Image (cartoon, rainbow, N blue to C red):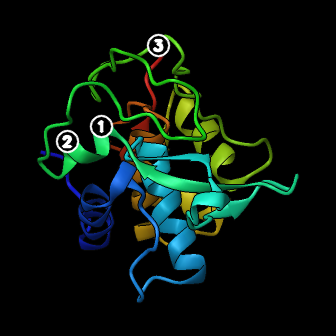
Amino acid sequence: MTQLSDTQALILSAAAQRPEHIALPLPESLRGGAAAKVVGAMLAKGFLEEVDANLRKGELMWRETGDGHGTTLVATDAGLAAIGIEPEGAHIAHAGAPDAPTEVPAPDTPTETEAAPKARTPREGTKQATLIAMLRAPEGATIEEMMAATNWAPHTLRGAMAGALKKKLGLTITSEMVEVRGRCYRIPEA
């Protein structure tokens, strides 16, 4: 089952009990920027979707679209599945929304409309770019050499190598003891 925060689970549970799975109103404790952050994350994960609000039916509005209309939030099949509720057939069509598809792909099934993740590249002239250039040198670099070039503390350098370079950029960093210099770190040739 998908990991949800307590607030996300509360929003989806309430929406599951409402007609057409409308997610509004949000919990009283969720206001302003916090509401936008939680809802934005749920929209990104596909747990909620924005549909045209039917103001004549008194539906609450999430945001205005600028043309005199607004949108409301509806729990998707993926959102209902995330709280353990089996959706009833296809997605329930909303009054203001176009007809829903008859088959909805599983939440973990990639679709052709999903873009490949962007490769992260450091900006030129930054300390991170300097660090990468030093590590790509054939002889690599020691912590002391990297400290002198970046003016960073040793723990900051180790954190940058483990987090930004290895995890985020996907670079491989090796280390070896060199008799004269001490421990040298480097990025091997690809």
Q: Which mark is residue 190?
A: 3
Q: Nearer the viewer, residue 8 or 97?
A: 97
Closer mark to the observer between disc 2 and disc 3: 2
- Residue 3 can be seen, yes or no: yes
How far across and how far down the image is residue 58, in percent? 58, 66
Q: At label 2, which amino acid type do we have?
A: Ala
Relative side of 158 to 132, left or right: left
Q: Which residue is mark 2?
A: 81
Relative side of 177 to 28, left or right: left
Q: CA distance from mark 1 to mark 3?
A: 43 Å
Q: CA distance from mark 1 to mark 2?
A: 6 Å
Q: Which residue is mark 1?
A: 77
Q: CA distance from mark 2 to mark 3?
A: 42 Å
How far across and how far down the image is residue 23, in percent? 41, 61
Contact (Cβ within 8 Å) of mark 1 with mark 2 = yes
**Above/below status of 6 relative to 90:** below
Classify mark 2: helix, strand or loop.
helix
Q: At label 3, which amino acid type do we have?
A: Ala
